[in-house]
Each structure stands twice: as structure tokens, then as C-alpha cells.
Amino acid sequence: MVVRNSAARAAGLLVALALVAAACGGNDDGPSDPEAAGPRDTAVEEEGEPQYGGRLVYAREAETSEPWTPQQALGDLSGLLVMRAVYDPLAVIDEDLQPAPYLAESITPNEDFTEWTIVTREGIEFHDGTPFDSAAVVANLERAKQEILTSRVFKDVESFTAVDERTVRVALTSPWATFDLALAGQTGFMASPVWLAGVDAGSASALEPVGTGPFVYESYQVGADFVAERNENYWREDEDGNQLPYLDAVEFRVLVDSNARTNAVTAGDVDVMHQLISEEILRLRDSVDAGELEMIEGEAFGETRFILMNLGKQDSPVRDPQVRRAMALAIDRKELTELVGGGVNAVANGPWAPGSDWYEEDSGYPEFDQEEAIRLVDEYEAENGDIQITLGTTSDPTRLRPTERVQRYLEEAGIEADIEQVEQGQIILNAAFGRYETYNWRGFSGANPESSYVFQHSDSSAPVEQLALNFGRVEDPAIDEVLDRMHTTADDAERAEAAKEFARLYNENLYALWLFHIVTGVAADPAVNGVGAATTPDGDPQIGVVAGLHSLEQVWMEDAG
């Protein structure tokens, strides 16, 4: 498995609408291995010249992206893997953590960031032969601005205008210094406008996506597999002038059970898979050490595991800051990371993962103190009655056990906690509509903290039963002010400082209960090469594997035939 970027660059990015499903893994197998904490150095040396051919079977963790129209799909990690194979984005993130043009030839702002100009590359066609031009860009971005799911991303956009065949002018209502970042995620995926019109008219299926990407839709069985074949007319070449992609086809196979995914890749039933469950990471490391697999691990810019709380649920005790503080004090995060998954993941004290410029070792999150937790619970219940909450998690057994341990911590402090298991595909919808009390969740990934803007700003909140990307329904003017600073500044240092302030404000109000930073792994048969080695069309390295997400146009298989 060829990786041209270092382990530090093999990190995560889920920008714009990466609506990540709640998930948690681990077991109760005893004390941790001190050498297990954090990701291992997983740089892999070059392994020869790329070869053409082969059908890559990729095991993914869930099925949530139905329909496949970019502006309506619930783009969690699994969905984005598929969409990235069929669609190209207008931009990607390079190794310097900056948006770089992809389908776009250039993306440039005016002096005060109130207007941006997108120039498209020439000679590119969608899979159905429709030209990729300024009209196609406008059709996609306008659709994103109108759709309920994606409209909050472009709330500052006044208009998208096709100036000529290749040029789009974006007029903003206020400065937005990181507009190009939004084009490097789901809202930047470009679909054929002819296909989109057909979907609207009922003459085309929303389950048969049409993009410009390296692979062309072949078949789809909801909840089972998605198959795409090589785009023989793909517009990109590698650095030696060879047409991309290298693979003949890719099959994305849904394996919800994390243990089943590990078994599948170790048995050779699938070629590659992503894994976020710490006990499975340890199992995969054993296979790597035995020379049976190769794996890219990452933590920096990756996801953080936390308890998401619905502050919009009017009858919930979690709306009370004293209850939230008691819950935070009751959870022994250090013991949790040791007992659940062998200590692979580092204890979290805020939203941002170690390794980023906006991570702060001490951002004011309270340390474990069971006695104080009990005192706060007793004081609250003396005036308000018993505290009863529901902890939500997925139906995967490996994701239930850590939730049971959190339940135990809370009950030891006097908080009655019931567990509710929900299918992973449904759990995102429940969060978006506020149909939950607390969820075991993951999020806050990204090579830029401003990626979280749309998920945390009050503008993205809504009452329960109305769709909202601010899943926690956190509405705080101080949080909004910090987010607006991240949104409007072009200075990376200023944005990093604002992100640190965001974490401190979150911890002061305990809007989330942090657990640990997730180590992700992408494991593959040694015959699979090029994972995390993608470049931009201009030949510069992309960031690589981001929280388990990566592209496939430069992946190849040895002796594929």
C-alpha cells in the first residue's frame, strides 16, 4: 500500500456536510498497553510502478447516503467514500492544509472576501456526456443553496452567476475568507445538471449518480453494495502522463459490524476497509506485524468521541448546566480509554485532536471527581426530582459496551441512565430532527477548524422536529461570535486562536461531554497500493487519508490481471 505522505499528513478531513454517524467501539478486556496509545507511524514506502486492472472490494461501515444527489445525500464517512469515487469536487485539501483547485482551475477572492471567482478546467465531461462548464457549476451550487440539508453552508451567498462559459462569480452578503473550503467537501461535488433535472422530473433515478469522477455507476443494492466501473474517459492523468484511474472497478460493500469488517479484510474477502473501533485497530495491528496487512493510522485533524446532548429537548435535564457538570465529573475518561479498546485512543479534553495548531492541552474541561458529581446530583434532585436520561448508541455490539460503561459511571453518581440502540443509518436523521436526548457521537474533524462552522452556529439550529445541522441545538451568542471570527479571517493563526477560544467556551458551558480522540485505520491487503497517495491535478500531494476518508483514482492493485 503506497503512501507518499508521512504519517503526520495521513490525517482526516470531513468538511462541509460530513454528517458523521454516532459510533463507538471497544471492549472490557482489561488494562491498556502503554505502547498502544495514539496512532502508530504508518508511512509506507513506494512499491513499484502502478498497474492497470482489478476490481477493488471496499468494506464500509454503514448505509446512509440515499439518494445520491450531492445536495440531498447524508454524507457520512461511508457515503462520502462512494460519492468521491463517482463525483469530483471543485477543490481538495493539499498537504499544507489549504484548499487546492480540482475540477476548478482556480478559485480566487477579491480583497475583502465578499466575492469569489471560480474558473473551470477545460475539456471535462460528465459521465452522460454533458459538458462540465460554468452553467453546471451554477446549477449544482444553486441547488445546494436551496436544499434544506445544504442551504446553511451557503447562507452568506447572495448569488452564483455564470459570467462566461468557464467563469462563475460568487457574490457574498458578508466576508467569507474560507469559502473555498466549502468547495472541498460534499457541497463541492459536481453532478450532471441534465441528470439532476431528470431526477426532478422523475425520468432519472436518484440512486444512479452521474458525475465527472474516476468511476461510473454500474449497480446499487441499498444496504448491500454499490459498484462503479472505470471511467474510460476520465480527464486526469498521473505524473507520468498515464490516464487515471488504474482500477477496472470498485465495489463498496456494507459491513455494519466492525468485527465483521476486520474479519473480512484479514480473511481476504475484501481488499480494503476503514476502521474506527479501537479493539479492532489492535487486532489489525497484529495482522500488520505479521505482514498480512498494511494499515494507515491517523489521529490529527481526526474525529473526537463525545456525548452529544440535545439542548433543544425542553423536558430534558441535560438542559441544566448543573446536570451537565455532574455528568462530566462522573465519567472517568482515563479509565474509559484504558478499559475500552486497550488505551489506543487519547483522552479528550476538548473538540480538537492533538497535532493541530488549534489543539490546547488544557482548555478547562473538568477532571473526574465522583464525590463532587454525587453532591451536584443530590443538590439538583432535592429541588427537581430524580435525574433520568437516555443514552443513545448504535446497534453494533462493539459500540454498545462503551455506552454501558458510561451508563455505569452516571449511575454510580446517582443519575438513572437508560440505553437506546438505533440503527446507524437512522441515528443521523434522529440527530438532525432532534429526536433524541443524548447520543454517543463523533465529530469535529477537519484540516481547518472552520469546517465545524455550519454544525455549531446558532443559524444552523432549529426547534425539535425541524431539520438542523446544529445537532445539539446549542444557541450561544459568544460561541457564534467566535465562529464568525473563524469564518471571516484569512489569518491561520487568528483562526487557530479563535478555535481554542471556542473549545474553552464549550467547556465552560459543558455543551458536550468529551471522551477520547479517535485513532482511525484504513487496512488493506499488501497488494493494494496508493491509498493516501493522491495528488492534485497540478501534481501536488493531497492531505492523504482523513478520518478514514480518501480518494481512489490513484489506487492500484498488484498482479490484478
Image: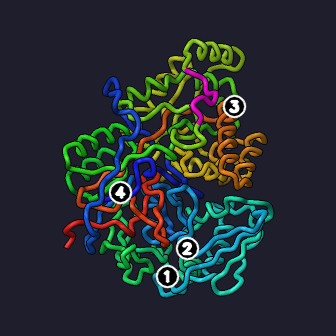
In the picture, which quadrant includes the C terminus? bottom left
- Observer-side mark, 4 or 1, equals 4
Q: For residue 255: magenta?
A: no
Of residue 258 and residue 310, the one placed in the foreground of this image is: 258
Location of residue 526 in the rendering, given as x and y in whole percent from the top left corner: 24, 56
Label drawn at residue 456: none
Q: Is residue 170 above or below residue 467?
A: below
- Taking depth in this image into account, of 34 and 411 the one nearest to the observer is 34
Which residue bears the numbered disc 1? 126
Q: Earlier in the sequence, mark 2 or mark 3?
A: 2
Q: Residues within 10 Å of mark 2 (few under 14, many from 20)?
A: many
Q: Could you tell me if the residues under marks 4 and 1 are in contact, i.e. CB atoms within 8 Å?
A: no
Q: CA distance from mark 2 to mark 3?
A: 39 Å
Numbered range of the magenta stretch: 360-367
CB within 8 Å, label 4 to label 3: no
> Which of pointers 4 and 3 indicates the residue nearer the eye?
4
**Mark 4 or mark 3, which has the lower sequence index?**
4
Residue at 30%, 55% in the rendered image: 45
- Residue depicted at x 43% and y 59%: 550
Q: Which mark is residue 190?
A: 2
**Sequence-first tag of 4 and 1:** 4
Residue position marked by numbered label 4 in the rendering: 3
Give me the C-alpha separation between circle 4 and circle 1.
29 Å
Amino acid on which disc 2 is placed: Met
Could you tell me the amino acid type at mark 3?
Answer: Asn
Percent from the top left, x then y, of residue 546? 46, 53
Marks 1 and 3 close (CB-CB < 8 Å): no
Q: Is residue 320 left or right of residue 246?
A: right
Residue identifier under label 3: 509
Quarter of the image containing the N terminus? bottom left
Residue 180: x percent and y percent? 63, 64
